[in-house]
Amino acid sequence: MCGITGYIGFRDAYPIIINGLKRLEYRGYDSAGLILYDGDTIKMSKTKGKVSDLEKQVEKEISKGGNIGFGHTRWATHGVPNDVNSHPHFSESENLAIVHNGIIENYDTIKKELINRGYTFKSDTDTEVLINLIEEVKKQENVKLGKAVQIALSEVVGAYAITVFDKTKPNEFVVARLGSPIAIGIGTNNKEFFIASDASPFIEYTKNCVYLEDGEMAIIKIGRAIRVRKIQDDSLVDYSVLQLKLNLEQIEKGGYDHFMLKEIYEQPKAITDTFRGRMLVNKGLIRMAGVDDNIQKFLNAKRIIIVACGTSWHAGLVAEYLFEDIARIPVEVEYGSEFRYRNPIINEDDIVIAISQSGETADTLAAIKMAKSKDAFVFGVCNVVGSSIAREAHAGAYTHAGPEIGVASTKAFTTQITLLSLIALKLGLANGNISKTNYHTYLREMELIPKKVESLLAINDKVKYIANIYKDATNFLYLGRGFNFPVALEGALKLKEISYIHAEGYPAAEMKHGPIALIDENMPIVVIATRKGHYEKVVSNIQEIKARNGKIIAIVTQGDTTVKEIADHVIEVPETIEAFTPLLTTIPLQLLSYHIAVMLDRNVDQPRNLAKAVTVE
Ligand code: M6R
């Protein structure tokens, strides 16, 4: 977590850094800070709070001049969010400054050693320990900054993306990564460079970008091509410069009040972008290089293990239903965090599918590294191009949802399901588990999904009306069955994370094994009761809720009459194949959580305590 951005070159660094921090604020937002170097002194300003608080403080505290500087927006790990613990941090001499994203696990031992050598510490952070370690190495070994960083990093255990500046050698930055991303934007003729946790802070300045790999560091010097080295053995790396495809419009709100709402409305396009060029309906073909190139591995697989976290884990649960139903391949869905630590049995003919919007989630990344060490074939389903999970996997496919900036995942979820549906269909046809006729029916239906989602978005006002009635509830229950059980979990997660209302998702039939005790006239219960998929049984559950005076918000198929008579509110979704219902039923649940959060005056795009990319365990 945490966002880092920096600039070194000929322009005013301040506007680049402050705007960059605003774009990276999704990564963490409990405190923010920056340094500027004006050719003489390093000016630092940092504060608890948002980037907008930092902006106000800079106005009062420091002059904004200087062509060199970097900033940080924080998601606290070591040390509470306060002014002192905010980044950047100076070394003891105040010649060195650092911003850091990640955790130094052995910081305490190093700190004690440094204290014995006379160092003092202002903050509780692991980062201040790291910058003092670098300073100590530089002094003891009498080496340049780059070498000192390299030696210091080989002593630390943990994860990091760092940028370091040395006032005594002010025309360079040293950056390094292990487990947390860092992108370097390269200006024309190497006259300027940009640093950022993702490329969004510098896309209007350059499209030339180098993503450091884990275990790499770079020396960035004005007027010289960057040098990338391996931290472990100092060997030079032959890096490649990528051309960014991202544009400014994609990372702006485009007239919507919040990124989350924009991203909900982007789903018809995002789903189309996911299957565009892959699903050739007229030819009856699904083309996906990552699967095509490894088709035998997929067909020989005895089992698929899906690893993911949060919303991506819910997409994995939908995929379990898809793969087992359509391709008849057994599936296990695992939380990355549990899988990596429980010594799981992984066989050579298992396929591990890692699902991650950001491609940076630490637990998912660690899970696939562990699976690889046990010789499993790892396939990544990521949204962020060039992300760590995408690069770590043996093969994979991007969802092409476009940047998702709202912390609550929306279009990432529906595009993950879209992509996984295509894989399931491809495998189901290849291994003979679905007929050609059925396969064609699925493809034709998938092609219609974006239009159906688009028409469904017209329910926005109705959902807003329902949100207003239930916004003050303190608990919500979400129920669904089959393909829509994961949707119930996802609906509950969306409500929890952005409105801070407690919500639970359950398989509808499990209600009578416990949650039914919670039901009274104050409890809103969202029930997914589409016509396909255990409809009668869900209707019985709705009756049971009614009998206990629960308030029922039912998601039903267009034209439903039965549930309409029992439920307090119904939201209709278009008819579709059962396996694709999650792509539709999810939408009203996203809107419901969005409107409730707005009505409660929550920070929808940056809910408390959360961050978009969870790059720590
Ligand atoms: O980037 P990832 O898909 O790996 O992220 C996983 C979770 O952190 C993420 O889905 C999280 O649960 C979202 N805030 C949910 O909206």
Image: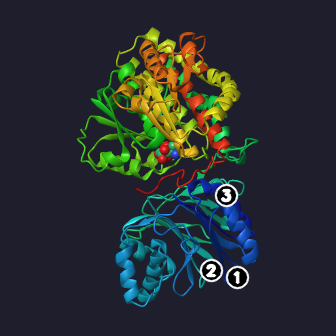
Q: CA distance from mark 3 to mark 1?
A: 26 Å
Tag 2: amino acid: Pro
Q: Is residue 329 above or below residue 95?
A: above
Q: Would you say the residues marked 3 and 2 are in contact, meaning their CB atoms lie under 8 Å apart?
A: no
20 w.r.t. 64: above or below: above
Between the residue at mark 3 and the residue at mark 2, the CA separation in whole angstroms equals 26 Å
Q: Is residue 66 left or right of residue 301?
A: right
Say which element carries label 1.
Answer: loop
Residue 614 marker: none
Q: CA distance from mark 2 to mark 1?
A: 8 Å
Whether residue 290 is visible, yes or no, is no
Residue type at mark 1?
A: Gly
Dots 2, 1 in contact, CB < 8 A: yes
The crowding category of the residue bearing disc 2, from other C-alpha atoms within 10 Å (few below 14, some 14 to 19, many at least 20), is some
- Pick out the residue farthest to the bottom: 118
Name the residue rendered at 51%, 79% in the picture: 145
- Residue at the disc numbered 1: 39
Where in the figure is residue 188, as x and y percent of width and height? 70, 62
Depth check: 494 or 187 in front? 494
Please tell me whether mark 2 sits on a helix, a strand or a loop.
Answer: loop
Q: Nearer the viewer, mark 3 or mark 1?
A: 3
Q: Could you tell me the amino acid type at mark 3?
A: Lys
Q: Earlier in the sequence, mark 3 or mark 1?
A: 3
Ligand 1 within 8 angstroms of badge 3 C-beta? no
On screen, residue 318 versus residue 299, left or right, reads right
Residue linked to disc 3: 22
Q: Position of residue 264 (x, y in %)?
A: 63, 35
* Mark 3 or mark 2, earlier in chain: 3
Circle number at residue 170: 2
